Amino acid sequence: MKHILALIVAVLFCSQLPAQENTVSGSSYFQAVEEYKLKNYSKSVELLKSLLEQGKATYESYALLAYNYEKLNDYENAYNFIQEARKRKPEDENLAANLLGILAKFQKWKALIELCEKFIPTYPNNAEMRYFYALALAEKGAGKTALSQIEKAKANHPNDVRFLELEGKIYYSLKSYEKADVSLRWAASINDSSSGIWNNLALVQEALYRQNLKLGKKKDAVSYLEEAKQCIQKALQLKEDDPTILENEKRIKALPSA
């Protein structure tokens, strides 16, 4: 979608992983955890691979390797190691969700959809899984199906900003601007410090301005244009050097009043 800010996909690393049974390997593992937290991903990988070579690694070590490689933008290793972790603990819900997160990060939408359809019946209330499923469906052009998944998720997570923001993006792509407006206003009321939400809300107001101008509703068009300018300014205040927001601000600012 031109000019709209993409949703950021992040794999959430759980720092409360179970302790290693062996004292020596446990010490190395927790050192690797600390290196990960310090963003020393290559050093963390080095420590974890040492555990593997010693035959002391457990599923936590494989999972942490996956998270490190995800940060290093190495899809193949991230995917392979999260799968190794899951082999050792196949029923772990967090590992399953993080596998989906890795697929989403690297835009493996087809594989993501297939796994979501396998996992969600087992974990129907898992918000992360439902979000990744809706995101993948939207990216593959199945916006209406994605919206149905969002509705199911909102039944249990009505104020989850991720679903509201994604819902707004989908409605925008479907040119249902009034519905996009409702979703993004709701998202902004929950999280008013997101430059992405304010940017996207500005684009919705811009679209409503153009729509009403075309219909001859000049008064409404002027109102939407003013809101678009206010929203894009809020986005700029939060992230003043973002090139997409700057481009949108320049275009919206140049729009003539009806």
Image (cartoon, rainbow, N blue to C red):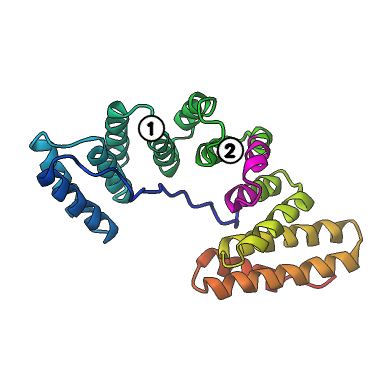
Which class describes the residues within 10 Å of circle 2: few (<14), some (14-19), or many (20+)? many
Direction from residue 134 to residue 77 in the image, left or right = left
Q: Residue at x 67, y 69 (%)?
A: 231
> For the residue labelled by badge 2, is the local secondary structure a helix, a strand or a loop?
helix
In this view, 243 is above or below 57: below
Give the labeled residue for mark 1: 92
Residue 134, numbered circle: 2
The kind of residue tagged 2 is Ala
Q: Residue at x 57, y 61 (%)?
A: 196
Which class describes the residues within 10 Å of circle 1: few (<14), some (14-19), or many (20+)? few
Image location of residue 81, percent across then percent down? 27, 35
Tell me the magenta residue range: 149-166
In this view, 43 is above or below 240: above
Image location of residue 184, percent across then percent down? 68, 56
Direction from residue 80 to residue 57 in the image, left or right = left
Q: Quadrant of the C terminus?
A: bottom right
Q: Does the residue at mark 2 contact the one at mark 1 (Cβ under 8 Å)?
A: no
Spatial separation of the CA atoms under disc 2 and disc 1: 22 Å
Residue 85 sits in quarter: top left
